[in-house]
Amino acid sequence: MAIVYQKSKGLTDTELHYCPGCNHGIIHKLVAETMEELGIIDKTVGVCPVGCSVFAYNYFACDMQEAAHGRAPAVATAIKRTHPDMPVFTYQGDGDLTSIGAAEIVHAAARGEKFTTIFVNNATYGMTGGQMAPTTLIGQKTTTSPLGRTVEQAGYPIREAEMLATLDGAAYVARVCVTDIPNLNKAKKAIKTAFQRQMDGDGFTFVEVLSTCPTNWGLSPVDALKWLKDNMIPYYPLGVIKDTRAEG
Amino acid sequence: MAKELWKGNEAIAEAAIRAGCTAYFGYPITPQSEIPEYMSLHMPQSGGVFLQTESEVSTINMLYGAGGSGVRVMTTTSSPGFALMQEGMGYLAGAQVPCVICNCMRGGPGLGTIQPAQGDYFEATRGGGNGDYENVVLAPSNMQEAVDMVQEAFDIADQYRNPCLLLIDGLIGQMMEPIEWHEVKHRDLPPKDWATDGRNGRDHHNIINSLYIDPVECNNFNTELQKKFKLMEENECRWEETDCDDAEVVLVAYGTPARISLSAMEALREHGVKAGLFRPKTVWPYPYEALRKISKQDSVKKFLVVEMSEGQMIQDVELAVQGRKPIEFLGHAGGVMPTVEEIAEMAMKGLK
């Protein structure tokens, strides 16, 4: 029998802990496949966050560090600066990156640190039970905005990718999702491009992946995908937001 | 080797480079900014990494990243900056990341003053981060000791897989003194086979982490950490006794106040008062046993603790003396230094 599909060597055999319908597993797979295809599992260091993907150090087969909440870009900066030949990535959620870690990600991007950030945005604090995040949409109900987020009370959701793209140190910034095969393929391409640009020394590379949280959104996995498409994509448009190698 | 005149902060920076420190991350803050300034020029020249960070919060996490990937890494800061680093101190201890941190203390609380002080004693010796952890805290009182201790600090950090602190007051950082560069004896250190420096064929991936979600596992990890801290207590405690053998009054001080106290002790002796000086060179582990022994001497009538704070180390003196003898305190905070005269005057009070 021929093997037509198998798990990426970029992942360990540890069973994932994610909820049914959560997109983290798919995004892990894309990062793992990227490392495998680029032949860099043996020399990459990943940095994982505090949040739902806190245990990602058990899942990625490369060397891993578990950072304090929001500090992954500082940790990754130091690893990369002291090991410039090694690919380095951070894997962070929206509470970790846009809220408590806002300073670290902005300065890493501004300095043009040559690592890749995979930013998983599910518009909520998943692990702590679905509280409002800086990325929570206006009107979205969470456990700390039970009547729906209002501008008056909590201001506006942050478009992190667009904000970081304004910084000269950012070489490649994209926003993708993994709701269907065409989008999944685009996401894979963006992640691989980001890693490749890092290894080429272009600068800071950033891929925001819109993701579902069926558990905290209170939706079935299928309905959650639909909710993402109907609500998140209009506010967080998909595409390559910045590419310093693009024509024009 | 000939003596050279160095400014404290610059000598500390140079000592770190000589000790094999290859990465320095830091944020400017008075009175230690000469260290990042020196590092910005000399670290790259010696093939190392210098980076001025966006905050001390970021700095301490950069130590985590670099130290965790096997590099000899250092930062320096002053009191408000050290306060910002406390979150990271817990993570460094929890993930067992070796690194060296120098706190060049200034007056507090809050912004306080940029003048020398010792108000971060509790923060350094009791820990401002969360959880049960300890750091070896070296407390030099002159420049030669500082440059020697900085070099040894990297070995201590690597030996125990733990941060090592150098606690100085701003005066030691700012003043100039002659020093002699000599080879500091290096320890036999274990290989850093735990570092995240790429698998390169290793059959497993290394993980730097302080998370133990299972309570039993977390408890067991703490038990292991305590064994390590016990070893640090047994091996790393140091102190200096001057004329304590026949002393009626024993001055207890570290850092700059120890130097002033030494002058006071000498002045007292000249006036026929039998004074001695007990100087901890590590404030964690604290030399409880040695001080306790002195407290049991019949000659000793009292202790006088001298600090550039409102009284922090005095708690350790109380733990050592256990009520055997009276303990008096002379201290100023906010950058005001105790004088020889006031120390001598207070030391003589109540003695026949």
Image (cartoon, coloured by chain):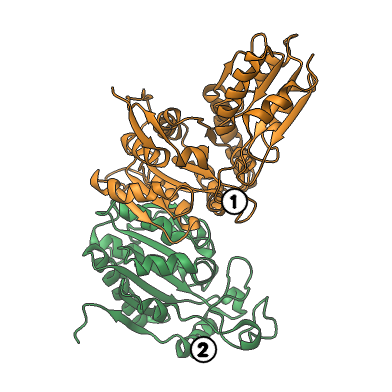
Chain colours: A green, B orange
B163 lies above or below B292: below
Residue B74, percent from left and from top: 41, 44
Mark number for residue B19?
none
In the rendered image, the residue lying farthest to the left is: A247
Residue B29, visible in the rendered structure:
yes
Q: Quadrant of residue B17?
A: top left
A213 lies above or below B344: below
Q: Quadrant of residue B229?
A: top right
Mark 2 neighbour density, 10 Å: few (under 14) some (14–19) many (20 or more): few
Marks 2 & 1 on one chain:
no
Q: Residue at x 55, y 75 (%)?
A: A213
Q: Is residue A247 left or right of residue A27?
A: left
The amino acid beneath tag 2 is Asn
Residue A15, percent from left and from top: 48, 57
Q: Is residue A133 left or right of residue A5?
A: right
Find out whether the residues at labels 2 and 1 contact each other: C-beta distance under 8 Å. no
Q: Quadrant of residue B254?
A: top right
A199 lies above or below B318: below
Viewport quadrant of the N terminus of chain A: bottom left
Check disc 2 and report the residue beneath it: A231
Residue B123, percent from left and from top: 62, 43
Instruction: Name the residue nearer the viewer: B213 or A48.
Output: A48
Q: Chain of mark 2?
A: A
Check disc 1 and report the residue beneath it: B213
Q: Chain of mark 1?
A: B
Viewport quadrant of the C terminus of chain A: bottom left
The amino acid beneath tag 1 is Ile
Disc 2 from disc 1: Cα separation: 34 Å
A16 lies above or below A147: above
